[in-house]
Amino acid sequence: MFTVKASLTHTPRRKRRDVVENDEFAAFARRIIRAHGRRVAAGDVEALRDLTALSAAIDDAIGQAVIGLRGFGYSWAEIGARLGISKQAAQQRWGGQQ
């Protein structure tokens, strides 16, 4: 009798977290960033550097999120689709950060 090793055929199940208020949380973050931009535009030139630093922090957060999603088993195609880019573009952008 032939048997197949389960470890070779088993597809790992993704651990999905319950999503809680993602839309509201993202909207809140966007409001804060826009308010900071208005503050700079109103003459607070010293805050311009801080606003630019937010861009770098967002890029870092996206990279961390993508690495985390890959750890949960999401494919480059799934991640790329959510970002509106190809799987190749997603892998080129964040594949080296793993």
Image: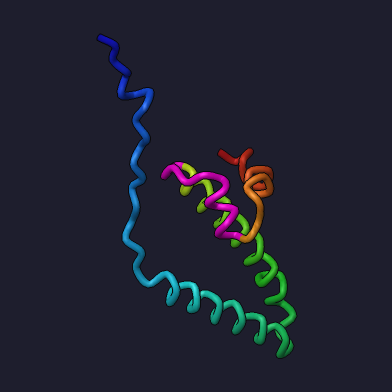
Q: Residue at x 71, y 70 (%)?
A: 49
Q: Quadrant of residue 20?
A: bottom left
> Relative to 47, does residue 38 appear above or below in the rendering?
below
Q: Residue furthest front?
A: 1
Whole-percent x, y for residue 21 in the image: 37, 72
Is residue 92 toward the left or the right of residue 11 in the image? right
Majority secondary structure of magenta residues = helix
Task: Name the foreground residue: 74 vs 3.
Answer: 3
- Residue 86 part of the magenta-drawn span: no
Quadrant (top left/top right/bottom left/bottom right) for the N terminus: top left
Q: Which residues are magenta?
A: 71-83
- Residue 74 part of the magenta-drawn span: yes
Task: Name the foreground residue: 32 vs 22.
Answer: 22
Is residue 42 toward the left or the right of residue 10 in the image? right
Q: Residue at x 63, y 43 (%)?
A: 91
Q: How many marks?
A: 0
Q: Residue furthest bottom?
A: 42
Whole-percent x, y for residue 83 in the image: 60, 59
Task: Name the foreground residue: 86 vs 25.
Answer: 86
Task: Name the foreground residue: 25 vs 54.
Answer: 25
Whole-percent x, y for residue 68 in the image: 47, 47
Whole-percent x, y for residue 86 in the image: 66, 51
Q: In the rendered view, how is the structure colored? A: rainbow
Q: Residue furthest top?
A: 1
> Relative to 15, does residue 51 appear above or below in the rendering?
below
Q: Residue at x 47, y 49 (%)?
A: 69
Quadrant (top left/top right/bottom left/bottom right) for the C terminus: top right
Q: Quadrant of residue 8?
A: top left
